[in-house]
Image: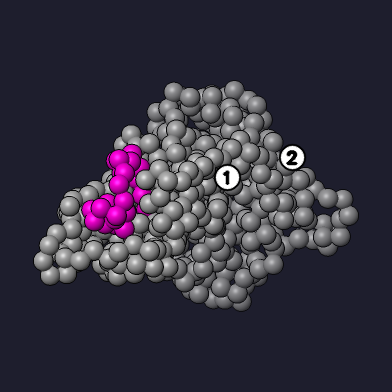
Amino acid sequence: MLSRVCSAAVNGIDAYAVEVEVNCGYGETFIALVGLPDAAVKESKDRVTTALTNSGYQFPMGKTTINLAPADVKKEGPSFDLPIALAWLAASEQIETDQLDNFVAVGELALTGGVRPVKGVLPIALRAKAEGRVGVLVPAENAAEAAVVKGLQVIPVQNLREAAQFLEGEIRIASTKVDLAQLFEQVVDDDNDFAEVKGQENVKRALEIAAAGGHNVILIGPPGTGKSMLAKRLATILPPLTLDEALETTKIHSIVGLLKAGQALVTQRPFRAPHHTASDAGLLGGNINPTPGEISLAHNGVLFLDELPEFKRSVLETMRQPLEEGLVTISRAAGTMTFPSQFMLVAAMNPTPDGKMPGESRSSPREIQNYLGRISGPLLDRIDLHIEVPAVKFREMSEVRAGETSAQIRARVIAARQRQHERFAARPKTTCNARMGPRELKAHCGLDEATRELLKQAMTEYNLSARAYDRILKVARTIADLAGAESITSDHIGEAIQFRSLDRQLWG
């Protein structure tokens, strides 16, 4: 007898439908698994047969053919165990149900018949809704993740027998529900707060501008000046995630397997800090079957690269396209995948190999040049704010009075982002000032004659590129938004220009 169960698999960050077909026939006992399965899927027939017998069902004798359609797409992972087992039970007439077409089933089976959690449940739930299914059968640990998709029954199952009995109507299992509003009301982690940072008021101001406009930042200063401390606190002043951003971020974390058991949604902006030994595939994503890397895991959040010159230059150069386009495309023999990568880059580095400023360094000019030369000009042009982080004076370190809290700074950042949201309402892909294209720059960054002359002088003096010109305009627009100004003035341009001068002093 032939039976079919609906399932799904992940391709990139989205899911596609998979039909699990099982046919039980006569003849010598043999199991054929077809449909381009990988090693983990091929092993599923051993897990499933053992789980069936340990769950109290009979192992079907005769030839059994299992097909995973579409047959021209490679299937990966153990998530097909549960649908294969359910289709096998239906094909061997050990269960009778008319609900197989209404539900999408995913889950790994233990040898005892228990159902273990799998990756990528959120995109699979979204696909099930798009396919018009009534609900999904998922492992209990993944139920909260799937339940963020409204209008879909999410049935948490603990074991194979429970799933089979539910489909037959012998038992009822309550659908999992989550309160999205309550998820977003969770308290922000306050272990890191700007109030704990002594001094560095100019750096705090620059990071506030960066957060308000979504700009990339590089912090340059000697060791021990607080570069890493400041970078880690940037995430505490970013605006909260919207529901769409949270869903997209959660999909990426789900397919990589970074969601905690029972976690429904990523509601805080991610902060990723890979080590400088990270490879191209680790940072961008890839491997034989392309998966998201660190820049995609930082999507809608912050990617912090400490000791920037210590990263391989080839690794840094591969970031140029994602920084510009907000997407990373990976081509492999298995196929081409595109992952979102709209993140804020925060980099930190010493000005010289020994950590001192150029005038104080004992390194030779050639050593300094080689050290700074590890970072290319095109990459620097894609970083909006270049900030010097000086050593903190004793008077500032001994100050008893605390500085502004992250909550106070965050309120101003949210107000500035709201102005940008209203400005770009007709162009939803432009989420902040840093994402403005030529059309938005022309429409929203007009300058009067005096301000234009000031910018012209800066371009000539610092020998800035056309890309740097655009970056200055974007930063100036953000400074104006923080000030509540409708138009850009010479004061805004002047402050934006000073954030481009440091790199020319070092690299010029």
For label 1, the SS is: loop
Number of residues whose C-alpha sits closer than 10 Å to that of mark 2, classed few (under 14), some (14–19) or many (20 or more)? few
Residue at the disc numbered 1 = 267
Which residue is at a point 72% across and 62% down the rendered structure image?
Answer: 391
* Highlighted range, magenta: 84-106
In percent of width and height, residue 362 lies at 61, 76
Residue kind at label 1, given as amino acid type: Thr
Number of residues whose C-alpha sits closer than 10 Å to that of mark 1, classed few (under 14), some (14–19) or many (20 or more)? many
In percent of width and height, residue 171 lies at 46, 46
| Count of marks, rendered view | 2
From what the image shows, is residue 463 above or below residue 376? above
* Residue 73 relative to residue 212: left or right: left
Which residue is at a point 49% across and 69% down the rendered structure image?
Answer: 276
For label 2, the SS is: helix
Disc number for residue 325: none
Residue kind at label 2, given as amino acid type: Gln
From what the image shows, is residue 361 above or below residue 340? below
Which residue is at a point 40% across and 50% down the rendered structure image?
Answer: 165
In percent of width and height, residue 440 lies at 44, 29
Q: Based on the displayed image, in which of its 4 quarters is residue 32 positioned?
A: bottom left
Which residue is at a point 48% across and 43% down the rendered structure image?
Answer: 172
Q: Nearer the viewer, residue 425 or 94?
A: 94
Residue at the disc numbered 2 = 408
Q: Residue furthest left?
A: 27
